[in-house]
């Protein structure tokens, strides 16, 4: 996004065309998720005599997952503030914290999937489970990509510092991506889990 | 100039918020974070304790999700109506409309399809 303001000219290097382009990509990603949400909305009652959401969702576990992602979104925000303050060390610290929280989230999700499959509730069992695994799995895959991207940017900040304009643009794009994933998760939390156990 | 920005960063970001910059201020992030936590815990509590009946409960958790979505978009993604944010906001609004048509349309069509197919399916 365009961070141009006459109050702080030295931040002008953020490439507004790149961030706008990335924003448009995120909006198209929104449509991808909308399609999968629509599939889930249609399929979630088709349990084929098997388990429904009520039987398999563990809400306290999911709440912890939600908080991990929510806190990581906040700590990434702190990394961005440190970036605009020009404090390299703080950027690295907050990126590392965000990464750790993201890994925690992903591990919990993989563990949840593993337990479901081990108990015989794999994606092949019913239309409900197929759409559940597709929706939550697609989000998880995005988180994984975000984490890989974060490692790469962490190394770049470590090696090259944060004075260049390019690194600011890159970190800004990742911040948009990360907040976006948090928003998608809120929808997953509400539509899949909260509505699933109602 | 620099000092005033650093000062404002630590003290609620008055300079920043006046100009509605894309990276926001500490105050914005903290407000957004606290609101998000509240907007997560309240619907969770409502659902796990079965306080409301099904209709109002559904309405309530959807309301909380939409408010939470808006809170995060405003406080974390810093989307606004300022001049330099206009195109981002326009793209966002267009996407919301498309998403609404896509999701509502799919559910509507599939519901009718299923409804009309039911007699033969149950034979």
Image (spheres, rainbow, N blue to C red):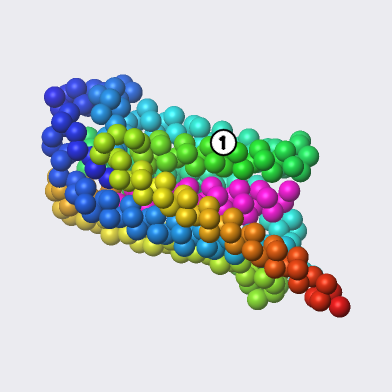
Identify the residue position indicated by label 1 in the image.
B39
Instruction: Report crowding for label 1: few under 14, some 14 to 19, many 20 or more residues within 10 A (C-alpha).
Output: many
Q: Position of residue B29 (x, y in %)?
A: 39, 34
User: Magenta span has A13?
Assistant: no
B20 left or right, relative to A59: left
Whether residue B49 is visible, yes or no, is no
Which is more toward the observer, B16 or A158?
B16
Total labels: the figure holds: 1
| Bounds of the magenta segment | A173-198
Residue A172 screen position, x and y as percent: 28, 48
B121 with respect to A11 (left or right):
right
Q: Residue at x 43, y 52 (%)?
A: B95
- Establish if B106 lies above or below A87: below
Q: Residue at x 60, y 62 (%)?
A: B106
**Image quadrant containing the N terminus of chain B:** top left
Q: Nearer the viewer, residue A95 or B70?
A: B70
Q: Is residue A191 magenta?
A: yes
Residue at 59% x, 50% y is A189
User: Where on the picture, by quarter, is residue A72?
Assistant: top left
Q: Secondary structure at mark 1?
A: helix
**Which chain contains the residue that carries disc 1?**
B
Above or below B41: residue B120 = below
Up-down: is A196 above or below B74?
below
Residue at the farthest right position: B123
């Amino acid at each position: 996004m365009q961070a141009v303001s006459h109050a702080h000219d030295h931040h002008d290097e953020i490439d507004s065309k790149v961030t706008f382009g990335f924003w448009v990509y995120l909006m198209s990603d929104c449509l991808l998720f909308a399609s999968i949400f629509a599939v889930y909305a249609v399929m979630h009652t088709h349990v084929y005599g098997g388990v429904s959401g009520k039987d398999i969702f563990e809400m306290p576990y999911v709440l912890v997952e939600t908080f991990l992602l929510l806190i990581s979104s906040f700590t990434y925000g702190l990394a961005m503030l440190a970036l605009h303050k020009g404090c390299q060390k703080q950027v690295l610290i907050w990126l590392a914290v965000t990464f750790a929280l993201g890994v925690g989230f992903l591990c919990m999700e993989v563990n949840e999937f593993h337990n479901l499959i081990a108990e015989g509730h794999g994606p092949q069992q019913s239309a409900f489970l197929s759409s559940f695994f597709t929706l939550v799995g697609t989000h998880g895959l995005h988180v994984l990509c975000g984490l890989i991207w974060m490692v790469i940017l962490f190394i770049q900040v470590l090696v090259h510092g944060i004075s260049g304009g390019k690194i600011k643009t890159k970190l800004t794009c990742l911040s948009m991506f990360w907040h976006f994933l948090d928003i998608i998760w809120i929808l997953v939390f509400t539509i899949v889990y909260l509505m699933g156990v109602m | 100039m620099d000092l005033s920005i650093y000062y404002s960063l630590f003290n609620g970001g008055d300079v920043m918020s006046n100009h509605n910059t894309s990276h926001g201020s500490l105050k914005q992030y903290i407000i957004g974070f606290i609101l998000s936590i509240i907007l997560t815990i309240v619907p969770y509590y409502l659902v796990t304790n079965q306080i409301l009946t099904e209709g109002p409960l559904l309405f309530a958790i959807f309301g909380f999700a939409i408010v939470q979505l808006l809170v995060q978009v405003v406080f974390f993604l810093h989307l606004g109506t300022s001049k330099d944010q206009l195109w981002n906001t326009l793209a966002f609004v267009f996407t919301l409309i498309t998403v609404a048509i896509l999701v509502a349309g799919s559910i509507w069509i599939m519901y009718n399809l299923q409804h009309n197919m039911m007699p033969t399916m149950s034979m």
